[in-house]
């Protein structure tokens, strides 16, 4: 694949400005997601008609994430990424308002509508990482992706603390004020995103490029998409179940908030150096480390049910997600031409979050019916499959280079 412009002629200065704005927006968007993950299953257990539906609001959030990926790509392709970003932030503000109303009215269905809107917001936010790489030099692309993801470190602190500070402000409506604050944060993110330089694609680019299925048949794209799917699904599977599992095990809401806070920090903290690791060792090796870390997290989850076991499992699965997902994203960027980026990136995210949605819908049933140990056991087969496919692809690439 050859770039449209010689790499040595690219000036990364404007890209760096975009990265700063996108990292700030990532922090605020991630805080919104943290509020949903920290409270969703607990609110669900209060409002749902049965305990087996307790994690449904989070699963609906993931469904919204999956449903929003292809429209995000189409809007970005037709009108530019900035338009998609603003629409996404508007969905985030609506999420907070609708969720607060749902809590006030004790409406489980309305709360699920709110989390769906939150998922649409998150689906747009997932394209921030690819937007950061637009126009960047080859050397700077993985760093741009990882620096935007690093904005989530702030989200890991802000989101759970926001819940802690606001959950009791509006008695007896637990968490209602948390979602009002979430809506305000989404509006702040919108203001930041308005300053991102993301012009509408040129008319010539809209018709250019290869057919999507031709790109998707590349072994490297298949490996990248599969690893991204597995890395994200496993992380979400464990994170969705953990707060409710901690409640079942007699742990406190503060214990749960603390675990989610450090889980999100672990998800995004490594992004300060993940890009450098990818540049040094290659994306495939970084992905492999991430998948192994996720398997390690499941092993920790199987070893005990104390607060420390839950916290350690959540932290390690967060680290594994970062290496696996950022590495897989860097692999995707290597498989398409610049004019193909919107459709290929949206298709990749549709695969990732579609699989994540299916996993999320099953997590509540598994936890309610079989317990936390089963949730941890089922993660091993998909991790093994992803590692095998990644290894076979790397082996084939080495053979092709030496042939």
Image (cartoon, grey):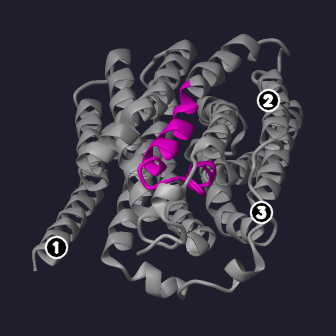
Distance CA(mark 3)–CA(mark 2)? 23 Å
Residue under pointer 1: 401
Q: Is residue 211 above or below residue 1?
A: below
How many C-alpha atoms fall within 10 Å of the one at disc 3: few (<14), some, or many (≥20)? many
| Residue 241, visible in the rendered structure | yes
Residue 46 horizontal side relative to residue 136, left or right: right
The answer to the question of whether label 2 and label 1 lie on touching residues, with beta carbons closer than 8 A, is no
Coordinates of residue 292 in the picture (x, y in percent): 23, 44
Coordinates of residue 381 in the picture (x, y in percent): 24, 58
Distance CA(mark 2)–CA(mark 1)? 49 Å
Secondary structure at numbered mark 1: helix
Q: Residue at x 53, y 57 (%)?
A: 9
Q: Is residue 219 above or below residue 304?
A: below
Is 137 a magenta residue? yes
Residue 99 quadrant: top right
Residue under pointer 2: 185
Residue 220 horizontal side relative to residue 165, left or right: left
Residue bounds of the magenta highlight: 128-153
Secondary structure at numbered mark 3: loop
Residue 196 quadrant: top right
Q: Is residue 260 above or below residue 61?
A: above
Mark earlier in primary sequence (2, 1):
2
Secondary structure at numbered mark 2: helix
Q: Which mark is residue 80?
A: 3
| Residue 50, visible in the rendered structure | no
Mark earlier in primary sequence (3, 2):
3
Residue 107 horizontal side relative to residue 215, left or right: right
């Amino acid at each position: 694949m050859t770039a449209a412009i010689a790499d040595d002629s690219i000036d990364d200065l404007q890209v760096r400005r975009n990265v700063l704005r996108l990292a700030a927006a990532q922090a605020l968007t991630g805080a919104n997601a943290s509020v949903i993950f920290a409270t969703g299953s607990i609110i669900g257990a209060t409002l749902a008609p049965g305990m087996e539906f307790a994690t449904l609001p989070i699963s609906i959030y993931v469904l919204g994430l999956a449903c929003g990926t292809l429209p995000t790509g189409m809007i970005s392709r037709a009108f530019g990424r900035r338009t998609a970003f603003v629409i996404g932030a508007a969905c985030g503000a609506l999420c907070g308002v609708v969720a607060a109303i749902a809590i006030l009215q004790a409406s489980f269905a309305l709360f699920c509508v709110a989390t769906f809107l939150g998922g649409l917001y998150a689906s747009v936010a997932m394209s921030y990482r690819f937007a950061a790489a637009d126009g960047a030099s080859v050397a700077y692309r993985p760093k741009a992706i990882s620096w935007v993801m690093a904005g989530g470190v702030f989200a890991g602190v802000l989101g759970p603390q926001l819940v802690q500070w606001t959950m009791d402000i509006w008695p007896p409506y637990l968490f209602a004020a948390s979602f009002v604050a979430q809506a305000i944060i989404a509006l702040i993110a919108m203001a930041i995103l308005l300053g991102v330089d993301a012009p509408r694609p040129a008319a010539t680019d809209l018709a250019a490029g290869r057919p999507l299925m031709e790109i998707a048949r590349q072994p490297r794209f298949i490996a990248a998409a599969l690893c991204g799917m597995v890395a994200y699904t496993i992380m979400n599977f464990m994170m969705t179940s953990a707060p409710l599992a901690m409640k079942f095990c007699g742990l406190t809401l503060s214990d749960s908030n603390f675990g989610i806070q450090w889980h999100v920090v672990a998800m995004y903290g490594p992004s300060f150096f993940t890009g450098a690791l990818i540049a040094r060792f290659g994306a495939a090796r970084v992905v492999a480390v991430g998948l192994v870390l996720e398997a390690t997290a499941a092993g920790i989850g199987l070893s005990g049910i104390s607060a420390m076991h839950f916290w350690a499992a959540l932290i390690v699965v967060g680290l594994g997600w970062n290496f696996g997902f950022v590495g897989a994203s860097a692999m995707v960027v290597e498989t398409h031409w610049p004019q193909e980026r919107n459709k290929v990136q949206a298709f990749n995210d549709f695969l990732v979050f579609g699989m994540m949605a299916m996993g999320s819908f099953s997590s509540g049933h598994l936890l309610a019916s079989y317990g936390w140990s089963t949730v941890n056991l089922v993660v091993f087969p998909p991790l093994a499959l992803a590692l095998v496919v990644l290894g076979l692809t790397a082996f084939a690439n080495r053979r092709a280079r030496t042939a």
